[in-house]
Image (spheres, rainbow, N blue to C red):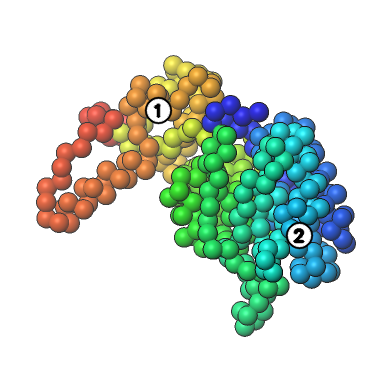
Amino acid sequence: MSMGTRARIATVSQDGKFKRDVEGNREYVLGLLNRALLEKPDLVCLPEAFHDVGVTKPVSETAESLSGPTIEVISREARRARCFVICPIHTREEGRIFNSAVLIGRDGEVAGVYHKACPVTGSADYTKLEEDITPGDSAPVFDLDFGRVGIQICFDVGFPENWQALADAGARIVFWPSAYDGGFPLRVYAYTHHYFVVSSTRTGTSRIIDPCGEILRETSETEPVIVRDINLDYVVSHWDWNMGIPDRIRAKYGDRVTVRQWDTGSAHFVVEPVDPALKCSDLQDEFGFESTAQYHERHRRAYQQIRAGERPTPQEARHGDRPQWGK
């Protein structure tokens, strides 16, 4: 079970193995969930609307209430394992149908719901959205016992404003249940907003992506369930003024802190404590480094004053006057 900001995250791929009825799909994905629960995760993410994919009945017949059979079965397993589960299904609410991701708590109760904000058109004239799905009107975040998370679903990937809204609200992980793989854009969102992105797909590969857009784990045909321990207390920092910091942290703390950096590409590194006794804020104080977000914000202040014809106000950054480049 999670302690503080650390969590074991699991995700699955349905891998195109669709059944002819809701009961068959539910049983198959329940099997994937139970495989994931053997790893004692804190949260498992399941694929978009897995219960009725491939079923010939209209969504108006397969949509369920929050107390319906799919939520009931998944809630039972969540309660048994004391684990959060993101259970995406079509839901029915006050006569309207939504493409939803239902967040089930460790106690098996519904802890929150995200309704897909951007369902894709199902007709050439854009008068039907996914068989008359109603678009959701918000991008909520959910405060779990290990940190703040957000959810997007499938076609939401094409609407950057919703991903920005989750970043502005302080999400540290965004889960993306989907019908398909998603590919490179998910890595872009992870890098742009410096949060983890975790996908769970009906077809294709599911992935756990770190806050610099690097793929940490991904499913395969022989491994449809993946798990990764992560710490939501992390810092993404820029190489400028900080090129020697990763080596100094490693030299003192060894494997008590994970530092991921790359010789080419993003000019960033991620500091992620492994030892629960260590906090990023303490490491920042000790070694004198700031997040990329802080680094960019310092530039914004200077830009604003220069554009106004003013001399920029001196700022006291944690890096002090050490060299901007070089170790």
Res. 130 visible in picture: no
Q: Position of residue 185 (x, y in %)?
A: 55, 56
Q: In the rendering, which numbered label is found on residue 251?
A: none
Instruction: Give the amino acid at mark 2.
Output: Glu
Which residue is the extreme one toward the left?
310
Residue 221, image x and y in percent?
78, 47
Quarter-wise, where is residue 216 in the image? Answer: top right
Q: Say whether residue 300 is left or right of residue 43.
A: left
In the image, residue 301 sits, relative to residue 132, either above or below, namely: above
Residue located at (53% from left, 56% from top): 139
* 98, above or below 242, in the image: below
Q: Position of residue 193 (x, y in %)?
A: 46, 48
The three-letter code of the residue at mark 1 reads Ser
In this rendering, is residue 302 above or below 147? below
Labels 1 & 2 near each other (Cβ < 8 A): no
Foreground pick, 246 / 272? 272
Instruction: Mark 1: give few (<14), some (14-19) or many (20+) Cα within 10 Å.
Output: few
User: Which residue is drawn at the image coordinates 60% and 55% (left, top)?
Assistant: 114
Task: Give the spatial CA distance, label 1 vs label 2.
Answer: 44 Å
Label 1 SS: helix
Q: Earlier in the sequence, mark 1 or mark 2?
A: 2
Q: Which residue is mark 1?
A: 281
Location of the N terminus (image quadrant): top right
Label at residue 64: 2
Residue that protrudes farthest toward the bottom in the picture: 125
Q: 301 or 186: nearer the eye?
A: 301
Q: Residue at x 58, y 51 (%)?
A: 151
